[in-house]
Amino acid sequence: MSDFFPLIVDGSGTPAIKEIPSGDVLDLTGVTVKAITVDGVSSFSDGTAGAPSITNTGDTNCGLYFSAADTLAFTAGGVAQVTFADGVIAPVTTNDVDLGTSSLEFKDAYFDGTVTSDAFAGPLTGDVTGNLTGQVATAAQTNITSILATDLKIGEDDQTKVDFEDANQINFYADNTKRVTIDATGLTVNSGSLETASIDYTDGDNALNIEDGGTVAVVKNAKGTLTTDNDGSFDMSASNNFKCTPSGNFTLTFTNIVSQSGNILLVNSGGHTVAAHANTKVDASILATISTAGTYLVSYFSDGTNVYLTNSAIYT
């Protein structure tokens, strides 16, 4: 077999190479091969980025070559672009190769692992079907204009957070307890107390100021609620000021007694007899006076245990 030469058969009018002795080199430079069938392994020289092993006649600096052991490289314009090795597709030069263009985009991408990027541009839309964890950014973000979701949570963890779990309502949690709620009616302290050195309730002129230590400063008038209670029993938790028009005899009584002061407008047009509960402190003449038919202003002051009364004369 060592003396074999290429066997050329011209039976069909088309030359065909049937056999080349092992180890021989057949130089086909300048020869156009119309079709070739290889039965076995074809070996190529390593090639280089400027002269790849596998290329075409019209663009010989673009193609594939073997840049290292177990590594296939792609070159374009004589410059190495991407390598393919066991378990990795990598650019030859960092930050040099784009994946797609602004007009030619890939469709879907599937990753099982970590995606690392210096930046993301354009809208990030769609749903996150898994957990989004980790630190979003270490620096202040100034380009975020809105974050909208029907059940959004923002916080340190699930125990300390701002929760938008309810429609038209913002809930503030601390230590896994809802502390404050803001809705269309205003701000509600659900648990604990509102504590600060100074609180200003204002429409621009500091109408009410609560200072550290409990001092309350009212710049304008202080308005209260007038509670009507005609049975002569006054619930201090309802109001400071009351109006009473009795329909029969009654005993002046106070419930839910706290340290509080206020007034009672007593319209005793029927001249009904007025008595006093044991915790209602009066002098000897008050009960006789206000039991007489007429209208009276009764002022009271409570020390948290007893309630002390004074009265006006009859109003004409």
Image: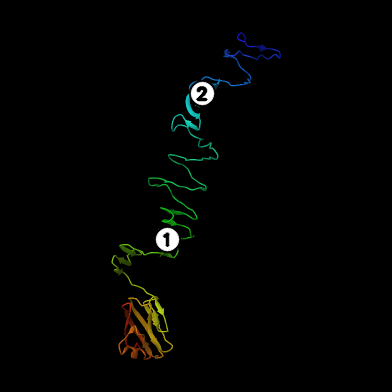
Question: Where is mark 1, residue-wise?
Answer: 177
List x then y, in percent, for residue 220.
32, 70
List x then y, in percent, for residue 201.
35, 65
In the figure, 108 relative to 214: above or below? above
Question: Where is mark 2, residue-wise?
Answer: 65
Q: Residues within 10 Å of mark 2 (few under 14, many from 20)?
A: many
Q: Furthest residue to the top?
A: 3
- As drawn, is 238 to the left or to the right of 88? left
- As drawn, is 117 to the left or to the right of 43? left
List x then y, in percent, for residue 115.
47, 40
List x then y, in percent, for residue 301.
31, 79
**Colour scheme employed for the rendering of this structure:** rainbow
Question: What amino acid type is highlighted by mark number 2?
Answer: Tyr
In the figure, 280 relative to 72: above or below? below
Q: Residues within 10 Å of mark 1 (few under 14, many from 20)?
A: some
Q: Nearest the camera: 160 or 194?
A: 160
Q: Quadrant of residue 188?
A: bottom left
Q: Quadrant of residue 261?
A: bottom left
Q: Nearest the camera: 126 or 44?
A: 44
Q: Earlier in the sequence, mark 1 or mark 2?
A: 2
| SS under mark 1 | strand
Q: Residue at x 35, y 88 (%)?
A: 290
| SS under mark 2 | strand
Question: What amino acid type is highlighted by mark number 1?
Answer: Thr
In the figure, 294 relative to 39: above or below? below
Q: Furthest residue to the front?
A: 1
Q: Are marks 1 and 2 in contact (CB under 8 Å)?
A: no
Question: The C terminus is located in which quarter?
Answer: bottom left
Q: Furthest residue to the right?
A: 12
